[in-house]
Amino acid sequence: MHNTTRRPPRLLNLIVLSAIGPMALNIFFPSMPGMMEVFNTDYGTVQLALTLYLAALATAQLFVGPISDRTGRRPVVLWGMTVCMVGSLVCIFAPTIEILIGGRILQAVGACTGLVMGRTMIRDVHGLDKSASMIGYLTMVMVMAPMVSPALGAVLEEAFDWRAGFVLVLVVTAGILAVSYAILGETHKGPYRSESVGQMFGAFVILLRQSRFSRHALQISLSSSAFFAFLGGAPYVTIQLMGVTGIEYGLLFIVVGVTYMVGNFFTGRMSERWGADRLITLGTSVGVLGGAALVLFYVSGNLTPFTLFGGMGIIGFGNGLCLPSGTASAISADKNHIGAAAGLAGFMQMATGALSSYTVGVLLSDSALPLVVIMATSVALAFVVNLLGQRLRR
């Protein structure tokens, strides 16, 4: 027997639930160059702890969404936080880089439940434009975690060692699990589906055949791709090539978080008035401006840590406008498969991000050119996909 909550879930609970994934993703960035020495390996191998985290975060969402349609949202959240805690413990006691990467994969599998269920539970109880507004506010506050995590990770590493960041993730996840168990209500209104695994994944085929879902899911994937490429390449470019310290990197990263939050705030205030489509168009247009700025900085020889993060800040503002609206539109494509839509859209977003991050890591050597090209291309393609999608709909 499943009982639905009589009131919408508390936004603060959904914020911290959704934030654990980005926090675990970002907190170890400043430690990546140092881990090369700790584990006696190269940067490409250390970066697998990022790339495979993103890949696991993507793949697990394919299962989390349909399972929540079948069993309810609350059980998925509780099990997910438990798995994330186990993964954190593995990372803390990892004697080799291979075991550390395994722990990161477990972290991602557990943390993805917060990302998917945060969006899904909002859509369970709100309409499209209201959902875009709520997701905008959720991500505005949630982004505080990845914004401060690199700086916090750098401080913890200097004060203790590289394990301290994983200890913090473990403690925070345990707190989220306790709070969710105590107050998180069930929002799935039913019916609770009892399909086979094949039928559950058949929902993905149904969704992909719907142009409304496909274009929005592809747009948010490409818009996010620039950010994930930045995550994969910026530590190497700024720390190894430009000579900034880990703490300086963490402080510069705050610029990206602030601009993204501003975009989220604007979305939260204006989505019900302007509508999701207009905000997506505005956001993807701003993203193109940011990508063009990065290309100009590189070509003119003016690419510095400040201009690199400044260009990413423009892209971040654009993403703050288009990602909440694009996400709400994608998961609203089929009211009978909200959880599956959230999972599939999240998979596409994270899979594209993992590919971008990995490609940047492979191509980077003595120049920031691969990072700039991939970021600029991603935001340009997101703009084109949205534009073509709107024309085809008309």
Image: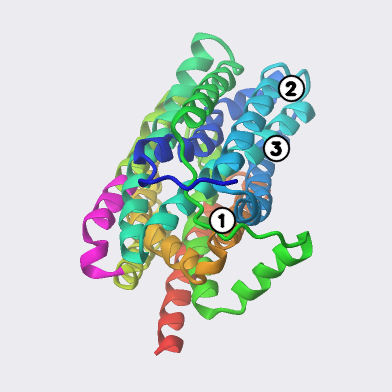
Is 260 positioned to the left or the right of 67 in the image?
A: left
Marked residue nearer the N-terminal end (3 or 1): 3
Disc 2 residue type? Answer: Phe
Marker disc for residue 346: 1
Query: Which residue is the site of mark 2?
Result: 39
User: Residue 151 in the image: x percent, y percent?
Assistant: 42, 26
Marker disc for residue 203: none
Rate crowding at label 1 as few (under 14), some (14 to 19) or many (20 or more) other CA atoms within 10 Å.
many
Q: Residue at x 63, y 51 (%)?
A: 61
Q: Secondary structure at mark 3?
A: helix
User: Residue 312 in the image: x percent, y percent?
Assistant: 39, 50
Is 229 positioned to the left or the right of 316 in the image?
A: right
CA–CA distance between discs 2 and 1? Answer: 32 Å
**In magenta segment, residue 263:** yes
The residue range painted magenta reads: 260-275
- Split into 4 quadrants, where in the image is the C terminus? bottom left
User: Residue 311 in the image: x percent, y percent?
Assistant: 36, 52
Rate crowding at label 3 as few (under 14), some (14 to 19) or many (20 or more) other CA atoms within 10 Å.
many
Disc 1 residue type? Answer: Gly
Disc 3 residue type? Answer: Ile
User: Residue 356 in the image: x percent, y percent?
Assistant: 60, 55
Marker disc for residue 105: 3
Which numbered mark, 2 or 1, is in the foreground of this view? 1
Q: Secondary structure at mark 2?
A: loop
Marked residue nearer the N-terminal end (2 or 3): 2
Q: Secondary structure at mark 1?
A: helix
**In magenta segment, residue 84:** no
Q: Residue at x 61, y 17 (%)?
A: 163
Q: Examine the rendered structure and indicate whether residue 293 appears above or below residue 24.
A: below
